[in-house]
Image: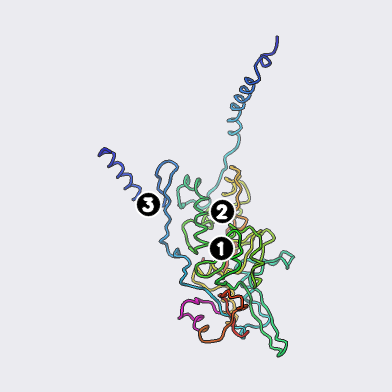
Amino acid sequence: MSESEQSGRRAFLGATAAAAAAGLGFVALAPGMQLIKFAEAKAGMAGASSKVRWGMLIDTTRCATGCTDCVTACATENAIDPGSGRPGQSSQWIRKIELKEQSTGREISLPMMCQHCADPPCVDVCPTGASFKRADGIVLVDRHTCIGCRYCMMACPYKARSFVHETLTQQNPEVPRGKGCVESCTLCVQRVDKGQEPACVEACSKGDHTAMLFGDLNNPTSEIARRIATTASSQVRADLRLDPGVRYQGI
Amino acid sequence: MKPLLATLPARAKQYLFIALLCLAAPVSIAGVPKPVLTIENPGECVAPPEVIRRTHMDLLQHQRDKTLREGQRGARISLNACINCHASKSTGSVLGSNENFCQGCHAYVAVKLDCFECHQPRTGIAKATGVKP
């Protein structure tokens, strides 16, 4: 290679490096070929960390019978519209359950939703890999790969998942949802990624019940970890050994 | 005397037909009007238009996995950011008519547009509580 050719190549590489450093992001190598550089150092781009495990502690002694603030807040945040006229088919990410112990007459009320298991059966059975667990323990459905087979709905012991039967038009821009896919509670992942609590937890504390506590189960200094370490809490269907991230007190 | 066409062998007739078709083809292509798109919020896009035209689907597909599966938020490539700049001011949407940004080109090139079966194509939808203004 001649000297002039070498210097020409150096100048070309230098120019492309300078263009990349200038934040253009796109560098033309040749006609039709581009180097694409993503600005991944930006704030909020760190993503979900496996050091964190998001969980929830629900104190059923504080949960008020007949109160549906959490269900309403979930519907508002995630644009879940029950107005199809077929209530049996509408999506249900969270529901209120009233229980009564027959022998003593003791009544309790609790919200039930996706329990964000550490070993989720919905992920085990998914044939396409659409059902997955994020590094921080949130169990989600990737609608891009969901084929709507509904195996996960069958596998879930908490009956937490719903299938979207009809065309939707009123989605929240941050929460894409559509016909033909299975969906469930996302722990309001779009809020959690911004450092906020899920909508149901916020509504519960606004309504002065504070029955729901959200936090990092892995962080020993977080309130949820301290409460779990000091007071009795239980997992629903603990016999299945799925290690749910949602725990209950007083059941 | 036979007509000239009848005297030609079958293979030659085929070639003649193809040659006539080739002559006619450019006329019909020129007849399809190119989409006229209004960019409502002109400004700096994430990449030059010629790059975006060729690679927007790859950019979006790459980023969607990063965002959904790895939880990376606030990326430079974002479908919501596309919609916020390109939604028509009259309909508030990137769909709805062939003058609107996404639909206009996709109708012209006859490529099905699946994004908006789940994603919201309109701006000005009541933002959820978790969306920062």
The image quadrant that residue A123 belongs to is: bottom right
Report x, y in % for residue A72: 64, 73
Q: Residue at x 64, y 80 (%)?
A: A110
Q: Secondary structure at mark 2?
A: loop
Report x, y in % for residue B4: 66, 14
Q: Residue at x 56, y 86 (%)?
A: A232
Residue at mark 3: A20
Q: Chain of mark 1?
A: A
User: What amino acid type is highlighted by mark number 3?
Assistant: Ala
Tell me the quadrant of the picture where the C terminus of chain A can be found.
bottom right
Instruction: Say if A160 sits above or below B108 in the image.
Output: below
How many neighbours does mark 3 have within 10 angstroms: few (below 14), some (14-19), or many (20 or more)?
Answer: some
Q: Secondary structure at mark 3?
A: helix
Q: Is residue B119 visible?
A: no
User: What amino acid type is highlighted by mark number 2?
Assistant: Ala
Q: Chain of mark 2?
A: B
Q: Residue at x 55, y 47 (%)?
A: B38
For the magenta stretch, what is the residue range? A213-226
Spatial distance from mark 1 to mark 2, Cα to Cα?
A: 16 Å
Instruction: Say if B70 sits above or below B21 in the image.
Output: below
Q: Is residue A40 left or right of residue A126?
A: left
Q: Residue at x 51, y 46 (%)?
A: B53
Q: Which mark is residue A174?
A: 1
Q: Is residue A26 left or right of residue A211?
A: left
Q: Chain of mark 3?
A: A
